[in-house]
Amino acid sequence: MSSRMRRLTGSVAALTVIGLALSALPAQATKVHSEAGVSTDEIKIGVTIPMSGIAAPGYNKIAPAAQAYLDYVNAHGGVFGRRVMLKVEDDRYSPTLAVSKTNKLILQDKVFAIAGALGTANHLAVLNSVRLGARGIPDLFVNTGYSGFDNPVKYPTTFTYLPSYVMEAKIIGTYLANNYPGKKIGLIYQDDDFGRNAQTGFKTAGTTFVVSKGYASGSQSSPGLAAQVGAMQAAGAEVVVMFGVSSATAVALITAGKMGFKPLKWIIGSVGGDPTTLKALGVPAAILAGSTGASFLPSPTDSTDPYVSFFKGINENYNKGRDTTWDNNALVGMNMAMILVQALRAAGKKPTRNAVVAALIAKGKTFVQAGLVPLGYSKTSHAGYTGYWFGTYDTNGDLKPDGGKYTTFVTDSGSGGVTTSNYKRPALPANGLPTNK
Amino acid sequence: MRERFALNWLRIPSGMRRALLLVLVGWGLLLISDRISEFRVYQGASVATYFVAIVSIVLLTGYSGQVSLGHGALLAIGGYSAALVMQNLHWPFWIAFFAAVFVAALVGALLGVAAARLSGPYLAGTTLAFAVGLPSLANQFSFLGGEQGLPFDIGVAPSRFGENFSPYKWLFWISALFALFAVWLAANLLRGRYGRIWRAVRSDETAAALSGVNVARSKVLAFTVSAGFAGLAGALLCATVSLVTPGGFPLSLSFAILTGAVIGGVRSLVGAVIGAFTLVILPMVADAIAQGASDAVSTNLPAVLTGVLLIATIVISPGGIAESLSHLGRKIALRRQKRI
């Protein structure tokens, strides 16, 4: 036997032994455990959200605020004896990272459900790649208004939180037609499905823009939005609708201030309309004052609202986030956590993923929550909130309802009309602790 | 005799044995993928992807002596080519992978023509600029999908693999298969005529030219082949997230690949394996260290760790871990021989 052949047989033998040894190990069972993330004393929920990076300002306060309310509930018995814990992953508003972090949450952290995932492009990528629906993993209270997520056939386990951008655009469009007939209207939008979804709504509402300009997500930091704001100015837009994330809205307002461009009215979409965040990003209250904004939750500065004062108290005592300034983002997070607690309660003492989905479909509409418009959860729709009220930013930059009281408008994501709503939300439960079953 | 046998397996030897070895490695991987958690399988796919990317650097830098700080751009070209082919021509995904290789190699050839005229810092600068500039093209042409990107979905395993065959395992099988194919190709190339030519050019261009080597052509060829590997890595990278976006190819990716190559050993395929594992393990280590630290720390720690490791490697063992290991092996062998 030549030395070469001997070497060959030797190595083949060695590798065969290794291979056989591996074959002898038991193969892992790939059975899906329906109660992943649920132990005797804990329910683990995963969140992907920008905690750093360009889109983080404001949104990075949502998850800590949600955990603050959950900590309060946990201190008072949790959900049938189990504490609810959020596992937060920073996706930096990048679709690529959102996918890998969601995979990590499901595979490594073994969360029971995903909740409050933020960002349209990010979450579209997640649903496309991770296939939450096909795998039966609940995808709760998606924190984006992209109407495509409300699709029980395609995404059976996905439930949205915000009113859809189509709804918002339809309601803003109707508002423009009623309040600014004949005025030249301009639009700045984020150039992805977030912005395109809004354009669909404006089209349905029959709004025509003299000028509309998109910005690429991330381009608000460099090269900035001078081209977009300049186009508004050049076209002589009298009313400008700013439909973008907070960091882009701030840049647009600051750029307009520098350019000396002062339209009759700025209308700021709810996604980028939190005044605390805008001020923190350097928007002077003077520029913000007089602009129109929209929200579905009560104004966070409304001290007469029982939900607001309750959540504000929780924020002071339980919020362990880095920035605990009370604002709309904190309110959004706490309210979401309150709905989450009820969804988990409604799934029973031995919660399963299927039971949570079924509970939201059957009972989600009746859950106690701070919103001034109804939740839309049903068998045929997984849409969260369904409408808005309009307000004006005052000299402090606080959003105050027009006419001194909340007038809410509701609609759908299709071709339905925009109507005023007389929805009465449920009263705040004793101590802010849901008792539903 | 026994020492030479061990040494021969450390350097990958020729022909049949190489192919056989890879088949056995593939068999081993297959068995392993059944016995580890799904998360490890998912990470395994990333290891395979980084491995192909690092092999691309080994070919370019380790063998032909050219530097590229912008390999991320070539990965992006591969990813986008694969996604576009699948979206517009509806070809099966495995053809899309070959399209990625082809298009990236084509761009690599063009880049290589420019690169052959540049050297050292000038080449580094040019490739760096390429990596900075290229991803922003996605926002200029609407068919590239802007910041939101394009889907690149390799789907789930065919039903004959069984109902419990997870999408992660499917991803791993595909990535591992392409990685094995890539390493087979690279090993044959490096042990053959072109490997010798590249090494000759790297050691001394003038001497190589005097012995009849067309230096410029050999450099362009190295760039082309390396770009092809990078294109494959790009398509694999996009497959792990079913998506191609400009944000998926940051400058830090180019640096990470280069770092992986240097840490493992820029002249060795075994080093590429070590480098690929390092790149997947580093963020986990960073996560563990940054537990409870502020966002600013946890966001930047992986980059800091990578940098520290890179500097440490260059100071302690410039040839990378693989070279240190083979030195060690040789020393032990020598000592034994002396004893006999």
Image (cartoon, rainbow, N blue to C red):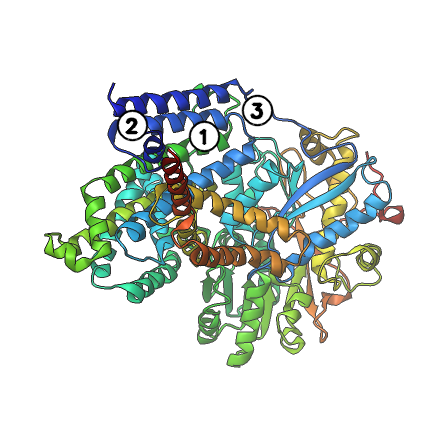
Callout 1 secondary element: helix
Q: Which residue is mark 3?
A: A30
Per the image, the residue denoted by label 1 is B170
Q: Is residue A163 visible?
A: no
Q: Secondary structure at mark 3?
A: loop
Name the mark nearer the viewer: 3 or 2: 2
**Are the residues tagged 3 and 2 within 8 Å (C-beta)?**
no
Looking at the picture, how far across and down is residue A148, in whole percent? Answer: 54, 43
> Do callouts 1 and 2 point to residues on the same chain?
yes
Q: In the displayed image of the protein, which residue is found farthest to the front? A: B339
> Residue extending furthest right?
A430
Front in this rendered view, residue A237 or A256: A256
Q: Is residue A7 above or below residue A240?
A: above
Q: Residue at x 85, y 48 (%)?
A: A432
The CA span between labels 1 and 2 is 28 Å
Q: Which residue is mark 2?
A: B17
The image position of residue A281, as x and y in percent, is 62, 70
Q: Report crowding for label 2: few under 14, some 14 to 19, many 20 or more residues within 10 A (C-alpha).
A: some
Give the chain of mark 2. B
Reply above or below: A187 against A369: below
Q: Along the line of sight, which residue is nearer the eye, A273 or B205?
A: B205
**Mark 3 Cα within 10 Å, few/some/many (few <14, many 20+)?**
few
Mark toward the start of the polypeptide (1 vs 2): 2
Residue pictured at 64% horizontal, 50% vertical:
A162
Q: CA distance from mark 3 to mark 2?
A: 35 Å
Amino acid type, label 1:
Trp
